[in-house]
Amino acid sequence: MTRTISIETLDHDGNFTAYVAEPAGKARAAIVVIQEIFGVNAGIRRKCDRLAEDGYLAIAPDLFWRLEPGIELDPDIKPEFDRALQLMGQFDQQISVADIEATIRGARTLVDGGKVGAVGYCLGGRLAFMTATRTDVDASIGYYGVGIDGLLSEKHAIAHPILLHIPQEDHFVDKAAQTRMHQGLDDHPKVTLYDYPGEDHGFATEVGARRSATAADLADSRSAAFFAEHLG
């Protein structure tokens, strides 16, 4: 079952919507799905639906609600891709982490105080790392997060497991940045990094030209095992 709910901000100054996909039976746990720069579009909703099929309650907050509520963009259409980049330029990542925290709190109530994980893509991959260092989320996964090498000073705050998927030909994250990520995180007991040779940014999208099916299936299988281990 799917529905849209309203979530109140931490400081009670507004409300934003979130797409929710629920499993057929009792949820194993909740997972917050953190959007790319394209909004809570068909691909992100499909990520939620697949998690629900695996027994999780999945919830994707509209993090662009302060800029353009409900926007959905297609990365394969250039004007829409350009619009996404414009929105990214106006987006406040610090405030968005607070919105993610509000979503985590809401998700916990939906699973009767159970565990909550987070998984994010692109912008969401970066935000998943920030969520791991700044909230009480129980486990986090980031796919092709941009600029994580600039957040390594926060790694001491990682209290729960985090998994990062790194495509080695990511045109938004160069080889030097990837090296810094490995140097900074390989020895962290809570962090697991997987590299994907020959793969580019967006390889695990559900739909569209960016998808690389074999690598996407491998990454998703690793993610499923990670969440099964750390969320139940």
Image (cartoon, rainbow, N blue to C red):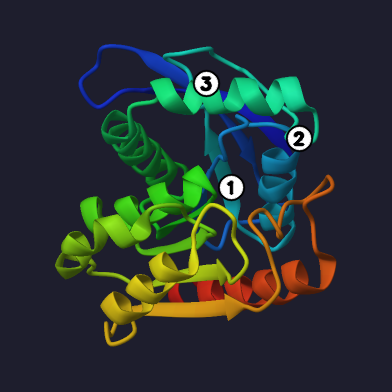
Q: Which residue is mark 1?
A: 58
Label 1 and label 2: CA atoms lie apart by 14 Å
Q: Measuring from the top left, give residue 189's x and y in whole percent.
A: 28, 85
Density class for disc 1 (Cα within 10 Å; few <14, some 14-19, many ≥20) is: many
Q: Is residue 193 left or right of residue 8?
A: right
Report the front residue among 147 and 29: 147
Quarter of the rendering containing residue 203: bottom right
Q: Which residue is mark 2?
A: 42
For badge 1, the amino acid type reads: Ala
Q: Measuring from the top left, give residue 151's x and y in whole percent.
A: 26, 56
Please say if 141 is above or below 71.
below
Q: Quick one: SS at disc 3?
A: helix
Task: Using the rendered image of the protein, determine whether residue 181 is visible from the camera's viewpoint.
Answer: yes
Please say if 193 is above or below 142.
below
Label 1 and label 3: CA atoms lie apart by 28 Å
Q: Is residue 17 left or right of residue 12?
A: right
Q: Quick one: SS at disc 1?
A: strand
Residue at 33% in and 12% down: 14
Q: Measuring from the top left, give residue 61's x and y in whole percent.
A: 50, 32
Q: Nearer the viewer, mark 1 or mark 3?
A: 3
Residue at 47% in and 28% down: 88
Q: Which residue is mark 3?
A: 86
Density class for disc 2 (Cα within 10 Å; few <14, some 14-19, many ≥20) is: some
Quarter of the rendering containing residue 76: top right
Quarter of the rendering containing residue 180: bottom left
Residue at 80% in and 28% down: 77
Q: Is residue 227 left or right of residue 158?
A: right
Label 3 and label 2: CA atoms lie apart by 20 Å
For badge 2, the amino acid type reads: Ala
Is tag 3's residue or tag 2's residue first in the polypeptide sequence? 2
For badge 3, the amino acid type reads: Gln
